[in-house]
Image (spheres, rainbow, N blue to C red):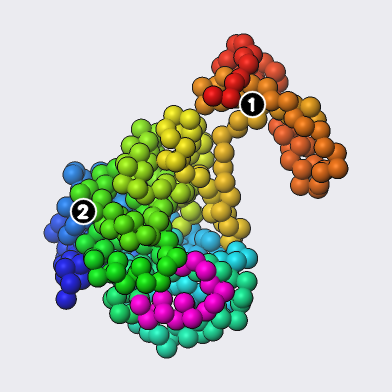
Amino acid sequence: MELWQKMIRNSVSTVDHLVERFNIQRETAEKLDEFFQARINPYYLSLIRFEGDPIWLQCVPDVKELEDIDAPEDPLKEDDMSPVPNITHRYPDRALFLVTSQCGLFCRFCTRKRKVGDQSKISMRTLESAFQYLEQHTEISDVILSGGDPLMLTDTMLEKILIRLREIKHIQIIRLGTKMPCVLPHRITPQLCDMLKKYHPIYCNTHFNHPWEITEESKKACAMLVDSGIPVGNQCVLMKGVNDNADTMKELMKGLLAMRVRPYYIYQADLTKGANHFRTPLKVGMEIMDKLRGHISGLAVPHFVIDAPGGGGKIPMLPEYVISQDENKVVLRNFKYNIYEYPDVRDDSQITDESLFMRKNVRRKTTLRSKKDRVKKIKIPVLQNGNNC
Ligand code: SF4
């Protein structure tokens, strides 16, 4: 058994553990266990600094989870978009391939609680209909291995899946959606990296939510992946009490970039059964983005997105930079709230339904707000000329 497997085995996971470690009333611990079992491996447990800190909130069961039990189980309608077991096909050329239901940590905010922790074994035989679907759908060029966490599979099982995927010629990109570099970095071994690099192009998206998750161990794990030619991106979830302020997000994004992990998405928290206490008002995310863009390297600025409830996919949310727009010019504000006018190029031959829609909407937004309000909102008294520096 490898070290990471031993650490999973030694996780905090039972009702007794919850009562002893976290002083949770037994009756509550039993209900929480029934709702969504705990799994906190010794490494992640060691990152907790005090009760209720951002690490604790992400992994220790909380009675609040039992208070919004009526919220949706599958907020993103992944199951409705599943043509065969283990595949979700939402976007034209990409498919999500769920290869395991196990994870190195059971995150309390998880949107896939309905599947995570399910003990039924996934074998190559049970994945056969998924492989056949991928073979038949030649429009799919990008497959995201997810779960659960695909790095919970042994190297041998993961390699079998990769071999099979590489036999499908129209699949160009394979992505690993894994939280292991953050929650159990010991999983990233030289053997794993040697195996993965045989099946390039492989990309990895990992999931750090707080700067305290950046440790010597997680830095080493990410470096090993990157040194194996695997670009690593980060998706994080905006959560109340965890990372809902600009300073924390700045530190996280800069820390990630310094270890060659490219910040990719900040997700607005989904409406998920047992996790609604993590949700923040949308304006919190917008204000954070406003304090990132221009203030830190563009390489460290992720997209802030809502994964639309009901399966609409990711929709980017941007602070408003366009003050007004007409056929001749666009008036913009920059990250310091200075205002700049950019002369537009008239090209009526290029007018499409989409561009008309955009223009109407920009005009509608700007007329809704009075000039006085605009000046107040942008806090800038004089119009300045911009330059290209
Ligand atoms: S690692 Fe991902 S799939 Fe697993 S519990 Fe955490 S958020 Fe959910």
Q: Point out the residue furthest to the right here.
A: 349
Residue nearer the viewer, 300 or 367:
300
Residue nearer the viewer, 384 or 123:
384
| Residue type (three-letter) at the residue carrying disc 1 | Leu
Left or right of 145 in this view: 218: left
Q: Point out the residue furthest to the bottom here.
A: 125
Left or right of 49 in this view: 77: right
* Residue 108 visible, this angle: no
Q: Quadrant of residue 113?
A: bottom left
Work out whether 150 lies above or below 389. Answer: below
In percent of the image, x 31 and y 52: which residue is there?
Answer: 58
Separation of marks 1 and 2 at Cα, in angstroms: 43 Å
Q: Is 160 one of the magenta-colored residues?
A: yes
In percent of the image, x 29 and y 49: which residue is there?
Answer: 57
| Residue type (three-letter) at the residue carrying disc 2 | Glu
- Mark drawn on residue 225: none
Position in image of residue 43 (x %, y %): 19, 57
Position in image of residue 201 (x %, y %): 45, 65
Please give the residue where the numbered disc 1 appears in the rendered image: 332
Please give the residue where the numbered disc 2 appears in the rendered image: 217
Label 2 SS: helix
Residues rendered magenta in the picture: 159-174
Position in image of residue 229 (x %, y %): 37, 60
Residue nearer the viewer, 362 or 11:
362
The answer to which of marks 1 and 2 sits earlier in the sequence is 2
